[in-house]
Amino acid sequence: MRLKDKVAVITGSASGIGKEIAIIFAKEGAKVAIADLNLAGAEATAAEISRDHGEAIGVAMNVMDEGQVNDGIAKAIEKWGRLDILVSNAGIQIVAPVHEYPLDKWKLMLAIHLDGAFLTTKAALNQMYKQPEGGSIIYMGSVHSKEASPLKAPYVAAKHGLIGLCEVVAKEGAKHNVRANVICPGYVHTPLVDKQIPEQAKELGITEEEVVKNVMLRETVDGEFTTVEDVAEAAVFFASFPTKALTGQSLIVSHGWYMQ
Ligand code: NAD
């Protein structure tokens, strides 16, 4: 077991990538707090994990709300006495061209992705700095942390911003044994992507099949979606890495869509 007795908080883990990370973390021996806007979904995921894999709790958390972030992280610490891993994963997507993008939607996108990462990081560091072992912070970036696509201005801006936040946390956290890294997945078939396919087809004036083949997967080496399991495996790698040799990094898991 690569995460035996580690305590993890994973945001946005009632669904998709975050849910799979919670499952694999539990299978690897971690105790996991499923922190999500969708409390019913978080509790259902926690019940599923508790039944099949290990210890889990569901906590209500809107990552944009400082009080809810602090309360949610405090619940995990109260229950298990420490915090070893934060996965800042909650996110949404709203597509539109820049010249039509509504300011309120732009602000919402930046708040979920950047305020959410900042607030959860701040709360986690305040616990991790008290522990001699420190901890591991993992941000869910994207290939869009590295390059752009049309219709996604705030998403691309925010995902690039996570790399900057991660690098600062890696530098500030080092003396407290805190590491910070970013996972950058390609397209993963989750509800977030399912919703985008018809929206992009409409915006671009092409069919849904063309969106998948010619927009989402065109640059991959094999025309395949990345899976939630692929991303979760990268999260275990970052979370379990034993030394500060691996910090301030971003790992692209995208079937070769983006290579660096
Ligand atoms: P998803 O829609 O399946 O899950 C997102 C979860 O986040 C949901 O459970 C939702 O309730 C929760 N959430 C939304 N807003 C929240 C908020 N304000 N506070 C707390 N929780 C909130 O999406 P997913 O595809 O699993 O995406 C997870 C992360 O992975 C996102 O950051 C996304 O940008 C990133 N990502 C996804 C893909 C992809 O192709 N699916 C690719 C690269 C990166």
Image (spheres, helix red, strand yellow):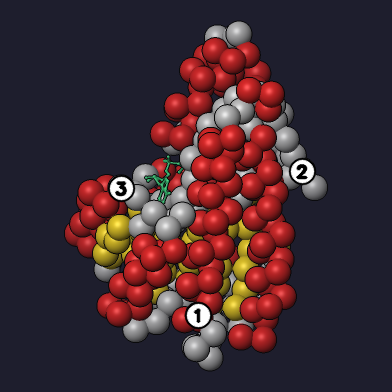
Find residue 150 and report its image quarter: top right
Report how far apart the C-alphas of labels 1 and 2 lie in the structure: 35 Å
Q: Residue at x 53, y 32 (%)?
A: 94
Report how far apart the C-alphas of labels 2 and 3 lie in the structure: 35 Å
Of the numbered discs 3 and 1, the one sitting upstream in the chain is: 3
Q: Residue at x 59, y 72 (%)?
A: 241
Mark 1, residue position = 126
Asked if residue 62 shows in the view, the reply is yes
Find residue 181 and report its image quarter: bottom right
Q: Nearer the viewer, mark 1 or mark 2?
A: 1
Mark 3, residue position = 38
Give, as a three-letter code, the residue at label 3.
Answer: Asn
Q: Residues within 10 Å of mark 1 (few under 14, many from 20)?
A: few
Q: Residues within 10 Å of mark 3 (few under 14, many from 20)?
A: some
Give, as a three-letter code, the residue at label 2.
Answer: Met
- Identify the element where label 3 is drawn: loop
Of the numbered discs 2 and 3, the one sitting upstream in the chain is: 3
Which of these two is toward me, 169 or 136? Answer: 169
Which of these two is toward me, 132 or 110? Answer: 110
- Judge: label 3 CB < 8 Å from ligand 1: yes
Classify residue 99 as left or right of residue 231.
right
Percent position of residue 214, x then y? 65, 18
Q: Are marks 1 and 2 in contact (CB under 8 Å)?
A: no
Find residue 76 and report its image quarter: bottom left
Mark 2, residue position = 259
